[in-house]
Image (cartoon, rainbow, N blue to C red):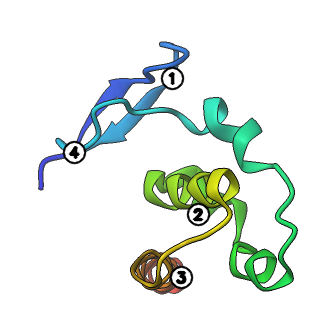
């Protein structure tokens, strides 16, 4: 998959690493306010408790958390994909 840098769709200042799938890329700084809203469910609070650098570097993780904060629920496939991505990032970090 080809990845390239593109300016943030919202602020037009920061560059974001994107692939062809992201039509409206946003940088971490623009999404930070949405990400730091409180998660009330204890189970999901523990689920989203991962290092901040994972959210900074991964657009997918940010989108899943923002989706949960908007709707209050996630499908099993979304949960599995989130866990798989976090596990891959932890493996890369340890190497």
> Upstream in the sequence, badge 2 or badge 1?
1
Q: How far apart are marks 4 and 2 (CA)?
A: 20 Å
Kindly give the residue lying farthest to the top in the view shown.
12
Observer-nearest of 66 and 60 = 66
**Residue 57: image tag:** none
Figure check: 30 above or below 69: above
Q: How far apart are marks 2 and 3 (CA)?
A: 9 Å
> Upstream in the sequence, badge 4 or badge 2?
4
x and y percentages locating residue 20 in the rendered image: 17, 41
> Upstream in the sequence, badge 4 or badge 3?
4
x and y percentages locating residue 62 in the rendered image: 56, 54
Helix, strand or loop at mark 3: helix
Helix, strand or loop at mark 4: loop
Asked if the residue under mark 3 is in contact with the one under mark 4, i.e. CB atoms within 8 Å, the reply is no
Residue topped by disc 1: 14
> Upstream in the sequence, badge 2 or badge 3?
2
Q: Distance between the residues labelled 3 and 1?
A: 26 Å
Q: How far apart are marks 2 and 1 (CA)?
A: 18 Å
Asked if the residue under mark 2 is in contact with the one under mark 4, i.e. CB atoms within 8 Å, the reply is no
Residue topped by disc 4: 21
Residue topped by disc 3: 90
Residue at image coords 63%, 29%: 30
Residue at image coords 46%, 51%: 59
Residue topped by disc 2: 54
Please identify the quarter of the rendering in which residue 43 is found.
bottom right
Residue 92 visible to the viewer: yes
Helix, strand or loop at mark 2: helix
């Amino acid at each position: 998959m080809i990845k390239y840098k593109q300016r943030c769709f919202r602020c037009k200042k920061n560059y974001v690493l994107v692939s062809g799938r992201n039509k409206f890329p946003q940088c971490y700084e623009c999404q930070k306010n949405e990400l730091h809203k409180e998660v009330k469910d204890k189970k999901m609070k523990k689920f989203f408790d991962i290092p901040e650098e994972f959210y900074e570097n991964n657009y997918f993780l940010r989108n899943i958390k923002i989706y949960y904060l908007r709707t209050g629920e996630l499908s099993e496939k979304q949960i599995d994909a989130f866990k798989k991505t976090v596990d891959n990032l932890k493996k890369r970090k340890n190497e």
